[in-house]
Amino acid sequence: QKEVEQDPGPLSVPEGAIVSLNCTYSNSAFQYFMWYRQYSRKGPELLMYTYSSGNKEDGRFTAQVDKSSKYISLFIRDSQPSDSATYLCAMRVGSSNTGKLIFGQGTTLQVKP
Amino acid sequence: EAQVTQNPRYLITVTGKKLTVTCSQNMNHEYMSWYRQDPGLGLRQIYYSMNVEVTDKGDVPEGYKVSRKEKRNFPLILESPSPNQTSLYFCASRPSGRPNEQFFGPGTRLTVL
């Protein structure tokens, strides 16, 4: 079993829809949770990160962590065609000196005009 | 412009022919790492370096070598490439103390025939 599981999609939605992207994980020691966005033919870029449980909002993006269920989500409100990309969740153990990130497989999102 | 650069961006080679993929960052970051990205497997760490002359294995180091003689450069060496090393490779860097914020290069698409 992979430490981090993410549905690869693809997920196709109309412009303006609310998008929900999710990851589950098995390691209860994970404390930091990140979402990266990767456009086609580009490297991943950090969208946002959260520590432990709770919500964090940044514009149209909201990251949510439920440690009791080992489940994290990224919500995108009012989705735009420019949001079309692959979204990777990543997480790490807080005490690690190396700061090693464990990535999900990525979910490909297409927002249609 | 703050960035991580990789060269070459695309490479087709044959089994056994030694190659080097260069990586350079201009942000004075201490930490650098190499990942490979494969469909269904996500990003997996190959090697990382916490500073000059300090390197260590990631999750999939077999068949790869690295060196860190200067802070800005972190080349990935495949001494005898094999077809199972066909993949998309990313170099990343981050400052120490900010383990969630990795900056990725644009990627190198390697095909080994």
Image (tube, rainbow, N blue to C red):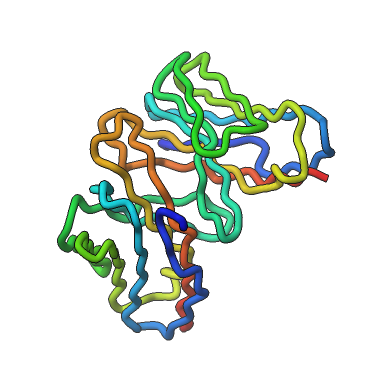
Vertical comparison of B11 with B68: above or below = below
The answer to whether residue B60 is above or below residue A58 is above
Q: Residue at x 47, y 30 (%)?
A: B48
Kindly indicate the quadrant of the structure image that contains residue A6.
Answer: bottom left
Residue at the (77%, 29%) spot, across then down: B80
Residue A90 picture location, percent across and down: 37, 52
Q: Looking at this view, name the residue that lies furthest to the left.
A: A54
Q: Nearer the viewer, residue B64 or B105?
A: B64
Point out residue A92 in the picture as x, y percentages from the top left corner.
32, 45
Residue A37 lies in quadrant: bottom left
Residue sitting farthest toward the front: A1
Q: Report the number of numbered marks.
A: 0
Q: Position of residue A1 (x, y in %)?
A: 46, 58
Q: Is residue B95 left or right of residue A41?
A: left
- Identify the residue at horizontal 52%, vertical 31% (top origin): B47
Who's the residue at 48% across and 21% down the image? B55
Find residue B83 and report its horizontal and vertical position in percent.
77, 44
Residue A15 horizontal side relative to residue A50, left or right: right
Quadrant position of residue A76: bottom left
Q: Is residue A8 above or below residue A94?
A: below
